[in-house]
Each structure stands twice: as structure tokens, then as C-alpha cells.
Amino acid sequence: MPLFAKADESTVLAYQAINNANPFLPERVDLERRILGEAYVEVGAVRSMRPDSGEANPNYPGLLERAEGLLEGARKKLSKASARATARELECYEDLAIYTLYHRWAPRLGELVKASADAPETHVSAEWYEQFRVDALAALRPGDRRLPLDFEVRHLFALCYQVARSFYLIFENILGTSEAAVSLRATTWKSIFTHDIRRYQRTLYRHMADVSTLVTGPSGTGKELVARAVGLSTYVPFDEKTHSFPTAEAERFLPLNLSALSSTLIESELFGHKRGAFTGALDARKGWFELCPAHGAVFLDEIAEIEPAIQVKLLRVLQTRQFQRIGDTEQRRFRGKVISATNRDLAECMANGDFREDLYYRICSDRIVTPSLAEQVSGSMDELEVLAQFIAAGLIGVEAPSLAREVVEWVESNLGVDYAWPGNFRELEQCVRGVLIRKEYQPEATHRVGVREELRQAFLAGEGTADRMLRDYCTLVYARMGSFEAAARSLGLDRRTVKAKLDEGLLERLRAR
């Protein structure tokens, strides 16, 4: 006797496809529509946060009820000693069981996710885990029959929590309904689980820390939000003895803005130092690479700004997973994941000799590109209004819709639907505040060229004297190195010469970018 009735086969296959589908792509919605037919409630073509989206998908109860009915019928058949089932049928049963378990316990999983977000310093506990375990064993081992994957329940629970956490982080932080926003959400999900979630749940969950993620895109496009979503969505094993996850959220994402620190401080923050390693090192200190747990991530913002000497050390960490504290000889092991971000063109940086090619290929095993606001909006005032309403909600709460409408009307009348938004989301935030306070927004008359680009253009044009070029170059190298000694070594000059040539005004502009 077949495990599933002929009339139910297409529905079971749809549930199996849902289990392996990217939840942020239209295909997932199409599958849900196929299962429910006329009972399906239209909620939009993709999963996206909207100001009026409500708390839950109204189709979930119907989908869960249908899945539970199919699962119970098949489970009874498998519980009989004489039951026979093909490998394909067992695989379908398994996916149906996982779908049912996840959505049956989704409200409780959501509570854990919210608790972690509200109190990132605390460890997440699930006192109700034993109830989940009993439910899972009944579904996944009908009549003591072992299914092909033979999950440990604690592993399944950890995966369910990871899925819930990842969906929450992506859904809440990557806003908008545009094609660019949909693509960014789907790409971020894929960076966490890959394109094959069955392979991920079998083996890949153990190895994703070895895959470094690079987030690129213009300034002000939410690169750190994407990095946080990836970094906080890593697989975390569940401890059945304590009914908890071993690390708190605050311990699993360790960010460092490299452009805001000198080279010495960057090295100390990343690698740590031994007591007495340099002036001011009064005590030994652990760095981010040492503090990061196996299921955590170190986020290196503005990766293009680090000097060559540190690039070499970072490359070694990524290649060997080993490092030493400053002033120490003991080899230590880095167990986490590296996520990097930059708004600079790394291909140009490599061509100019500012960034190592071998390091580039180590940090970009997986790449996410954040779209500009102009790409998001693309002439659509409806999309602009959606984004403006989210910003307004943080400013004035319930009156956000009316303010968002005022913003759109002002932009249409004064900037036009094709305004380029050179400042991206930060500029839109300023626009919303400007309309709120003054009922107008005054953007920069022109989008200024960056100071480094100004220097490059002046050099290529042959502008300025040799002395001026030396002053500019000494200042540029000093700004990158963070000390006169390091800059002097790089330039092949005496440190006093570098100090004498330093242009304080240019240095201030370089540090302000």
C-alpha cells in the first residue's frame, strides 16, 4: 500500500518543495497557494515587511492543519510492522514531518528569538524542550522505524531555532518590496543556509564558519545590518542537559570598524596582546579572534582600510585558523566566521597595490551586494513611501503614515521621482526629519567626490608641485598606517620628514570620510 494516497501526492511534493525553498522568493508563496487552492489568502508575491503587514501569515494555520492530517495518516501506516515504503516515500514523509514540527512549534521558537533580541547578553533557554522532543520522536520514528536521515532531536531543534532566528533577522532588517530588496533578502538567506538546505542540515552546518562572507555596496545601504543577520544566524548547538544554547547573542557577533582605529589598535583588538608587548599594555588582553566562539562571527567593517602588514596576518588566520597575540609566541586557534564589508572598489584597490589579491579571494568566498536606495526605489513613489513610513514610525509612531505621505509629496514636487539619493538610506532619514521639522529637505547641491578620489584625479592630471605631491602622499600613508614610524618604514623616509610633511587639514578630511 502506498504511503500517501494518489490524490495527495502533489500536495506532499509541494510540502517537500516548501521545506527546501528560499522563503523570500515568490516560489515559496506559489507553493503555499498550490496547497490551499481557493482557501489561500493573498498576502503578496513575496515575504516582505510592510508597515501594514500585521504579525502573521493568515495561511499558516491552514497549511499546518493540512500537513498534520497527511502526516498522521502516513505515520499510522508506517507504525504497522508489515508496512513497506520506498526511499522516496520516506524522504517525503521526513520533509512533511519537519515542516509540521517547525510550524507547530513556531510560536514558541518565535518567543525564544524575541527574548534573545530583547536581552542579547542572556543565554536562551527552552524549558519546554522535552515536549518538543516527545513530539519529534513520535513523528520522526513511527513504530520505532528509523528514517533515512535519522536526526538527533537536539540537532533538529537547533536547526528549527536557527531558521526562526534567520527569518526574523532578515525580515525585520531588510525592508522594502522592490525587486532589489527581494533579491537581497533571498541572497542573505542563501549565505546562511546555502542553496541546498537538505545538504546544510546533513553536514554543511558544521563547515559554514570556513566560508568568509564579503558585503559590498555604497555607503548608507545597510551593510552592517546584513552582516549582523548573517553573523547572528549561524548554527548554534543545543545543550539537552541545560535546555539552553551555550552562548548569548552579544557573544556571537563581534564588530570592529577598521577605519576608526590606528593600525596598532586594530592589531590589538583582533589578535590581543601579551602583557608588556608595547607601551601601555599593562595587562594581557584577548582579542576578537580569541573571544569569538565556534558558532560566532567577527565583523570587519571597512576592510579595505587596513595596512598591508595586517592584511598578511589576517590572511594567515583565514588560511590556517591560527594566530598569536602581539608579543606572544603561543599559537591560538580562531574557531568562528569572518564577515567583511567595504564601500570601496576592491578591484581598484588591488590594481593600485593597496589590497592583497590573495586576501581578497579568502574574504569573498561568499559575496552579498547591498543595492543603493536609487535601485530600491527605481522611480516608484510607492516603494519610497513604504521605506519612509518605517523611518517615520521610529520618530512619531502612529502618525507615521501621514508623515510618509508628506515626504513623498515633497520629493515628487521638489526632487522628482528619479532623484539619485546619493546618500542612500541615511539621506532618506535626513529627508524624513527635514520634512517633519521644516516641511522641506535641502540636499547637497552636488554629490562630493571623496578626498582619496580627489588626490587620485589630481595625480593623474599632473596637477600640483612635487612638494605638494609629497605632502599629500605622506599624509595619505600616515592616515592609513596610524603612526609616524610605520609610515616612515613604508615610505622609506625618516619619521621626522614624514612629520614635517604632514598636512593637518588633509589628514582631518581623510579621517572624516
Image (cartoon, rainbow, N blue to C red):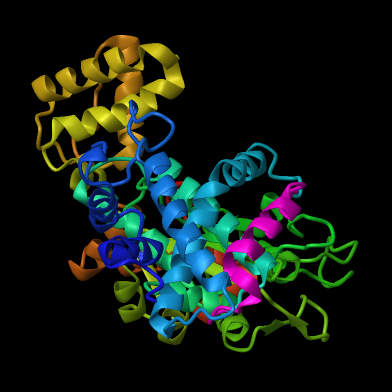
In the image: residue 31, left or right of residue 171? left
Residue at position x 73%, y 57% in the image: 245
Residue at position x 60%, y 45% in the image: 113
Is 128 inside the magenta-drawn segment?
A: yes
* Nearest the eye: 214 or 75: 75
From the viewer's perspective, is residue 502 above or below residue 198? above
Quadrant containing the N terminus is bottom left
* Nearest the eye: 22 or 285: 22
* Nearest the eye: 244 or 294: 244
Q: Which residues are magenta?
A: 124-149
* Nearest the eye: 293 or 485: 293
Residue 324 placed where, x, y %? 75, 81
In the image: residue 40, left or right of residue 343? left
Whether residue 232 is visible, yes or no, is no
Residue 227 placed where, x, y %? 48, 57
In the image: residue 480, left or right of residue 399? right
Residue 112 placed where, x, y %? 65, 44
Residue at position x 29%, y 25% in the image: 431
Whether residue 410 is visible, yes or no, is yes
Residue 210 placed where, x, y %? 55, 79
